[in-house]
Amino acid sequence: MSRTTADIVGTTGANFTFTLSAGTITNAAKFAGNTQGPSFPLSGDGREVTIQNLATGETWVELDLAGAPGDGMAVIDVGTVTSGTVNAAAPKHTLNAGKTPGFVELFGI
């Protein structure tokens, strides 16, 4: 993957949240290769993940998602940005709100 295919692109070191418009995130963890890393903090109503100090290059966030009937597709968007510059893909990418795991690709420049 690359900057052009990432769900969210931001400046290295940025602090922000990303959101899903549907489903509930029960866990969000860093994922590299076949190794799952530490969990990211969840906030809001179970649809927001906090990212601190965005790494350079790509970072995969593995999401455990619970979906309710009719949730459909969840739009991936940027929530609150507290430092740096962060933008969602245009047009915004989506995940199946009931599919687990789901993956969100972040890219730091």
Image (cartoon, rainbow, N blue to C red):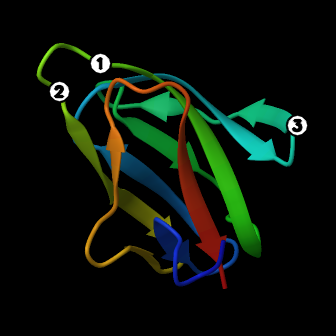
Mark 3 falls on what kind of element? strand
Q: Which image quadrant: the N terminus?
A: bottom right
The amino acid pointed to by label 1 is Gly
Residue drawn 29% across the image and 18% down it? 67
- Which label was assigned to residue 71? 2
Q: Is residue 33 left or right of residue 96?
A: right
Residue drawn 48% across the image and 80% down it? 85
* Residue 17 in the image: above or below residue 71: below
The amino acid pointed to by label 3 is Thr
Alpha carbon separation for disc pair 2 and 3: 29 Å
The amino acid pointed to by label 2 is Asp
Name the image quarter holding residue 35.
top right
Q: Earlier in the sequence, mark 3 or mark 1?
A: 3
Q: How many marks?
A: 3
Identify the residue under disc 3.
35
- Which label was assigned to residue 87? none
Residue 81 appears at what percent x and percent y?
42, 65
Identify the residue under disc 1.
67
Disc 1 packing (10 Å; few <14; some 14–19; many ≥20): some
Residue 94 appears at what percent x and percent y?
32, 52
Q: Is residue 89 left or right of residue 92?
A: right
Alpha carbon separation for disc pair 2 and 1: 6 Å
Q: Earlier in the sequence, mark 2 or mark 3?
A: 3
Mark 2 falls on what kind of element? loop
Residue drawn 17% across the image and 27% down it? 71
Disc 3 packing (10 Å; few <14; some 14–19; many ≥20): few
Name the image quarter holding residue 11.
bottom right
Check contact, mark 2 vs mark 1: CB within 8 A. Answer: yes
Q: Is residue 2 visible?
A: yes
Q: Which image quadrant: the C terminus?
A: bottom right
Disc 2 packing (10 Å; few <14; some 14–19; many ≥20): some
Alpha carbon separation for disc pair 3 and 1: 25 Å
